[in-house]
Amino acid sequence: MQRVIGESTALADMLDHASLVAGLDRPILVIGERGSGKELVADRVHFLSPRWGKELHKVNCAAISDSLLDSELFGHEAGAFTGAIKLVKGRFERAHEGTLFLDELGTMPLRIQEKLLRVIEYGEFERLGGQKTIKVDVRIVAATNANLLEMVDQNQFRGDLLDRLAFDVIHVPPLRHRIDDISILAEHFATRMCYEMGWEYYSGFSAEAMEQLVQHAWPGNVRELKNVVERSLYRWGQSDDPVNKVIIDPFNQSLARSTIGNTQTSDTPQSTSIESAHTPDGEERNGVDTPGIDKSQKMDFEASVRDYEIRLIKAALSACQYRQKDAAEYLSLTYHQLRAMIKKYKTELK
């Protein structure tokens, strides 16, 4: 189990909640923004539960196509579909007597939600293409950054499934509510990065650089902080002087003047300049506009972050001639992370 880093009150309260509910053999719902550490909470719940000696299986529902998710979760019989040449057990069978972590639950199609509800209520299901009822004993921990209550109102998520999953709900605090943890996490990630690069010592961050880290809103939470710290450290290089330049946004002019992989071939997309989202004037830059701040009106933070992510993805796809692997590299994401975000915003990206 990975160690959860931090000493803030918000984090401690959440961890206490997870520890308390871990011993109860009931489904748990973990709610939190992207990059906030929902998977670490699932780890904690499993390893503090009576099922700790059994397996913890993890499935990212957004990374698997709708047609394959049924087979991934429930397995399939030989001949169930083209290419199904043998019986394959799904995650529920393999997680018997253990825990199954379902990440990005909000992307699960309604048809599979119905099968999931039956497993929770009766502990049984049928493989794809099969007729035999299979019984399993699995504890479910599900996670999402979606507003499931709103999705229920829009008939995008089953209300009865939400009722069963939400025996208790653990809210993972965003990093902006864990100000005291930012410096601790930054030092942790920087030390690990130095070790990875084979540096003999770590000179630390300057007071000005650390203040910049503390003051940032971190819409990408701990995952974004890790990327920023590692990026800033390796670009600064091994030096006796503390790191004094924090590179929060990698989409700058120096990157725009080059191409991905620093090559000029017919298969390599020309980079498009996507400059910092932190410009005070809110002007539009190459299709990625940042809203100005009107202090007389309240701001919908989640909607603004969502809109910004959509604009970044559109700009990166356009710059990479819609080659998703190149766009993922351009955004410092894995291919599966980008695929999940494209699936999440598929309507807006059309």
Image: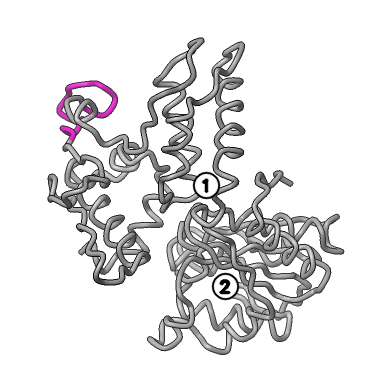
Image colouring: one colour
Q: Residues within 10 Å of mark 1 (few under 14, many from 20)?
A: many
Q: Give percent across and percent down for residue 249.
A: 32, 38
Residue 77 shows in this picture: no
Using residue 331 as the reference point, say whether residue 41 is left or right of it: right
Q: Give the labeled residue for mark 1.
A: 222
Q: Compared to 18, does 193 lie above or below? A: above
Q: Is residue 178 visible?
A: yes
Is 348 in the magenta? no
Query: Where residue 342 sits: x, y (%)?
Result: 33, 58
Using residue 48 as the reference point, say whether residue 163 is left or right of it: left
Q: Position of residue 106 (x, y in %)?
A: 47, 71
Mark 1 residue type: Val
Q: Which residues are magenta?
A: 259-271
Please provide percent x and percent y for residue 184.
61, 38
Task: Please determine whether, in this image, residue 318 is positioned above or below residue 110.
Answer: above
Image height of 4 relative to 292, above or below: above
At horizontal 61% and vertical 59% (from top left) the residue drawn is: 86
Instruction: Report crowding for label 2: few under 14, some 14 to 19, many 20 or more residues within 10 A (C-alpha).
Output: many
Q: Earlier in the sequence, mark 2 or mark 1?
A: 2
Residue type beneath disc 2? Leu
Relative placement, left or right, of 298 versus 217 is left
Query: What secondary structure characterizes most of the magenta part?
Result: loop
Q: Is residue 261 located in the magenta-colored stretch of the structure?
A: yes
Indicate which label's residue lies in the foreground, 2 or 1. 1
Question: What residue sits 59% from the left and 32% below the top?
Answer: 187
Quarter of the image for residue 130 reads: bottom right
- Regarding mark 2 in the picture, which secondary structure is present there? loop
Name the foreground residue: 26 vs 180: 180
Q: What number is the disc on residue 128?
A: 2
Q: How far apart are the alpha carbons under marks 2 and 1?
A: 38 Å
